[in-house]
Image: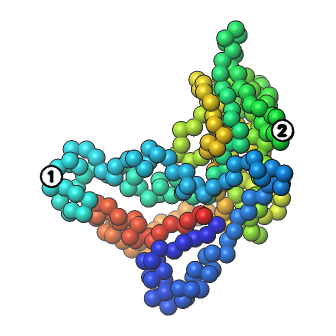
């Protein structure tokens, strides 16, 4: 994980006398996540990529503003008049979910259909050549309580008579003290729902496999290379929760948020909180 500091962030920190620019860049560039695969598979697997490399087209095509005011002749992106309703494209926290961590893609085509005779769903994949079975069917007894019919959230919307296990070819290794969150790709409407999990990837040197389900009513081809799983590394720390009343410092910070961020139509969050962590 490499954090690339934006110019304003570097300038602000360096000018404050905390550390030199070079020391800052050197320090934040030391984090590294490794994706390891067997040598005989390297020609065939689809490698993980930074999540920022797979930002969906719908987000790229989304305008920053839209509505009645956005088409007014006196309004443009650099103008201070006639502010237009902002879209989710201006929400930096939302954008950060689309560029945090890494994506492990599907390693093979997965065909989802319906048996014309029985009406039962069919899921097929190929296991030829190097493809030792990379997907396994798993009975619902592993995911749903047979006595109550309640289990992992999302299974109630699945019409397939079984779940599946994604046999991940990648071993993920992080620096000491760092774990990884494995989850369905955030803020995406995909035909696959993955069960989330946290793994201590600094000590567990093995492939991380996860169950997934085909969403209800989906029929089609999930192509090799499609987004499957998002991997977000994070540092493990001991936390203690406290519920309290705001201090004077909290009140000052709130006033700053209201005055510095909420008083402008756009750009307040980015201007006041610096650039986000990048994953490359």
Give the colouring mode of the picture: rainbow
Tag shown at residue 73:
1
Left or right relative to 110: residue 134: right
User: Which residue appears farthest toward the left when viewing the image?
Assistant: 74
User: Residue 94, image x and y in percent?
Assistant: 47, 53
Disc 2/disc 1 C-alpha distance (Å)? 61 Å
Left or right relative to 149: residue 63: left
| Residue 237 in view here | no
Left or right relative to 193: residue 73: left
User: Which residue appears farthest toward the top when viewing the image?
Assistant: 117
User: Residue 44, image x and y in percent?
Assistant: 75, 47
Q: Nearer the viewer, residue 47 or 89?
A: 47
User: Residue 98, image x and y in percent?
Assistant: 52, 53
User: Residue 18, image x and y in percent?
Assistant: 53, 88
Number of marks present in the image shown: 2
Tag shown at residue 279:
none
Q: Is residue 67 above or below residue 265?
A: above
- For the point 62% across and 81% down, the residue is 26
Q: Secondary structure at mark 1?
A: loop
- For the point 59% across and 63% down, the residue is 279
Q: Is residue 56 above or below residue 241?
A: above
For the N terminus, the quadrant is bottom right
Mark 2 lies on residue: 129
For the C terminus, the quadrant is bottom right
């Amino acid at each position: 994980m490499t954090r690339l500091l934006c110019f304003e962030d570097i300038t602000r920190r360096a000018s404050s006398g905390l550390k030199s620019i070079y020391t800052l860049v050197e320090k934040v560039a030391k984090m590294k996540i490794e994706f390891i695969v067997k040598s005989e598979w390297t020609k065939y697997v689809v490698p993980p990529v930074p999540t920022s490399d797979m930002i969906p087209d719908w987000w790229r095509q989304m305008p920053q503003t839209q509505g009645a005011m956005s088409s007014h002749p006196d309004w443009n992106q650099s103008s201070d008049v006639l502010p237009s309703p902002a879209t989710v494209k201006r929400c930096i926290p939302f954008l950060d979910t689309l560029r945090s961590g890494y994506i492990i893609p599907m390693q093979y085509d997965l065909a989802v259909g319906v048996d014309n005779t029985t009406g039962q769903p069919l899921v097929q994949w190929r296991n030829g050549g190097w493809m030792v079975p990379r997907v396994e069917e798993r009975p619902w007894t592993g995911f749903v309580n047979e006595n109550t019919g309640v289990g992992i959230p999302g299974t109630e919307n699945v019409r397939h008579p079984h779940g599946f296990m994604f046999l991940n070819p990648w071993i993920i290794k992080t620096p000491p003290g760092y774990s990884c969150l494995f989850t369905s790709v955030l803020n995406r409407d995909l035909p696959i729902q993955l069960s989330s999990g946290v793994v201590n990837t600094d000590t567990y040197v093995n492939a991380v496999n996860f169950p997934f389900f085909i969403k209800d009513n989906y029929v089609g081809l999930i192509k090799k290379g499609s987004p499957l799983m998002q991997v977000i590394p994070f540092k493990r720390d001991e936390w203690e929760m406290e519920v309290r009343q705001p201090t004077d410092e909290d009140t000052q910070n709130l006033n700053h948020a209201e005055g510095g961020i909420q008083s402008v139509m756009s750009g307040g969050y980015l201007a006041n909180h610096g650039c986000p962590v990048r994953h490359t």
